[in-house]
Image (cartoon, helix red, strand yellow):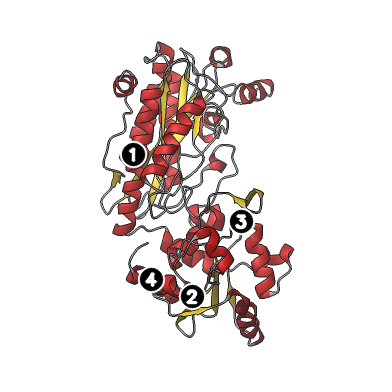
């Protein structure tokens, strides 16, 4: 938790960006895993954390824009609760830590909001990603559950995005710490990457590091020799010489800010010549993108520049052909990289994604493309100092996608399908770092350099 002044200031800034009404921010409830008493590890809603700071279930925060008052609605533990959880701070004690003196039982929330509605006051709330939150809004505001999404406040969405996406110095301390823990996770994965080791052994070890140094992982780790599957959720394989292990992982700091890095590691300890060729293309694409990111650049333009760099590399090894500008314009590189170059990062690894990607990553000046591949770019708008973004190019050989494109003769003027068919056993390579946009350019987050060049990775695996 940050200082009292931090949370008071954040709410005051948000209040200044809204015209009138009442803001309702519903914190998360416990989520049962397979029966009510066996829950998933609790994680508070990130927007509630940002403005109200309390990491306990069943809390609702209210901001009265017109009166300049803030309230917490929650219930103190009962004796039955205390038996199982022990004594915890009271609602009023936690509220005081974030600068709020007025607290009420949750049972009072419907009455307070119904009175406001009867007076014609605007009720602002954000999109909901949990059914429990939708039910809370239904019970408190009286909106039918299937229509809750129709009453989401676009004014609040835009105000929250404009505030949360620019990171303060104290937030960067947290992000740097999260990336430092992620460095420990990645370097441990490199040390463990040996033939005969199971994917789940590595996944379990690195996620233990995240929990022992911070608040756990910022997302489910991807640890797979099938790197062509972008978000591979399984750890069922055993590592074998000749394969590549893709590790995409991130830790949360103790204050729940995210890290996110990806490395691709040769199981045998050395990249073979074919792997080196593709790896160098991905690395060169990443480094060139990081050279040009800075304030005033549209990240969509950085993505397109990265695709041109990648196409040049793929052309040099005979996997692509023809005019590079035309190939990128027609989306041919999406066969090899069907995702975007990166996304914003902060309290969420995909920062504020639940609010709506188009609000977070796009604006009136930069519209989202409908072209395959480019449509998956989560961040396209103009970069500003304080943005934290990921830069994560990759090259993947997805047999099913290749077969689909080949059967349709798609982009045959740009893709050498004959040679491409010899790469269907390759897997995939992705390389990712997190970058802060500064006043005059950008900087890498964290205090340590995670091995990334071929020689650095091979040395780390050999330790």
Quarter of the figure with the C terminus: top left
* Residue under label 4: 97
Looking at the image, which residue is at 39% across and 55% down? 255
Quarter of the figure with the N terminus: bottom left
Residue contact between numbered discs 3 and 2, judged by CB atoms under 8 Å: no
**CA gap, disc 3 and disc 2:** 23 Å
Q: Earlier in the sequence, mark 4 or mark 2?
A: 2
Q: Nearer the viewer, mark 1 or mark 4?
A: 4
Q: Earlier in the sequence, mark 1 or mark 3?
A: 3
Residue 224 visible? The answer is no
Q: Nearer the viewer, residue 307 or 221?
A: 221
Q: Position of residue 321 (x, y in %)?
A: 50, 20
Secondary structure beneath label 1: helix
* Residue under label 1: 290
**CA gap, disc 1 and disc 3:** 33 Å
* Residue under label 2: 18
Q: Earlier in the sequence, mark 1 or mark 2?
A: 2
Q: Earlier in the sequence, mark 3 or mark 2?
A: 2
Looking at the image, which residue is at 43% across and 32% down? 205
- Label 4 environment density (alpha carbons within 10 Å; few <14, some 14–19, many ≥20): some
- Label 2 environment density (alpha carbons within 10 Å; few <14, some 14–19, many ≥20): some
Q: Nearer the viewer, mark 4 or mark 2?
A: 4
**CA gap, disc 1 and disc 4:** 39 Å
* Residue under label 3: 129
Secondary structure beneath label 3: loop
**CA gap, disc 3 and disc 4:** 27 Å
Q: Position of residue 4 (x, y in %)?
A: 34, 71
- Label 3 environment density (alpha carbons within 10 Å; few <14, some 14–19, many ≥20): few
């Amino acid at each position: 938790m940050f200082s009292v002044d931090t949370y008071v200031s954040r709410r005051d800034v948000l209040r200044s960006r809204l015209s009138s009404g009442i803001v309702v921010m519903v914190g998360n409830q416990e989520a049962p895993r397979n029966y009510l008493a066996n829950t998933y590890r609790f994680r508070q809603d990130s927007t509630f954390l940002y403005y109200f700071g309390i990491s306990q279930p069943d809390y609702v925060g209210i901001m009265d824009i017109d009166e300049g008052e803030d309230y917490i609605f929650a219930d103190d533990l009962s004796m039955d609760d205390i038996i199982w959880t022990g004594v915890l701070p009271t609602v009023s004690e936690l509220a005081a830590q974030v600068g709020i003196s007025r607290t009420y039982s949750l049972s009072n929330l419907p009455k307070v909001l119904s009175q406001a509605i009867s007076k014609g006051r605007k009720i602002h709330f954000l999109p909901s990603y949990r059914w429990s939150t939708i039910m809370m809004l239904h019970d408190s505001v009286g909106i039918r559950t299937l229509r809750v999404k129709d009453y989401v406040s676009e004014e609040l969405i835009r105000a929250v995005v404009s505030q949360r996406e620019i990171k303060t110095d104290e937030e960067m301390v947290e992000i740097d710490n999260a990336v430092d823990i992620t460095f420990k996770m990645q370097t441990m994965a490199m040390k463990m990457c040996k033939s005969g080791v199971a994917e789940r052994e590595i996944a379990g070890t690195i996620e233990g590091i995240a929990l022992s140094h911070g608040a756990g992982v910022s997302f489910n780790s991807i640890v797979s020799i099938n790197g062509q599957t972008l978000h591979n959720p399984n750890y069922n394989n055993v590592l074998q010489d000749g394969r590549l292990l893709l590790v995409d992982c991130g830790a949360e700091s103790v204050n729940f800010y995210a890290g996110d890095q990806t490395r691709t590691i040769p199981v045998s300890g050395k990249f073979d010549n074919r792997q080196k060729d593709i790896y160098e293309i991905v690395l060169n694409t990443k480094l060139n993108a990081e050279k040009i990111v800075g304030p005033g650049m549209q990240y969509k333009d950085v993505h397109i520049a990265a695709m041109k760099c990648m196409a040049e590399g793929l052309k040099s090894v005979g996997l692509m052909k023809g005019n590079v500008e035309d190939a990128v314009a027609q989306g041919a590189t999406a066969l090899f990289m069907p995702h975007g170059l990166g996304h914003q990062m902060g309290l969420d690894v995909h920062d504020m994604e639940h609010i709506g990607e188009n609000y977070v990553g796009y604006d009136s000046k930069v519209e989202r493309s409908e072209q395959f591949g480019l449509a998956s770019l989560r961040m396209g708008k103009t970069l500003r100092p304080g943005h934290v973004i990921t830069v994560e190019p990759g090259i993947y050989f997805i047999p099913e996608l290749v077969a689909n494109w080949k059967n349709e003769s798609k982009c045959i003027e740009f893709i050498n399908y004959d040679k491409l068919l010899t790469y269907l056993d390759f897997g995939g390579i992705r390389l990712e770092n997190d970058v802060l946009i500064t006043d005059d350019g950008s900087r890498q987050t964290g205090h340590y350099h995670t091995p990334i060049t071929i020689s650095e990775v091979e040395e780390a695996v050999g330790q």
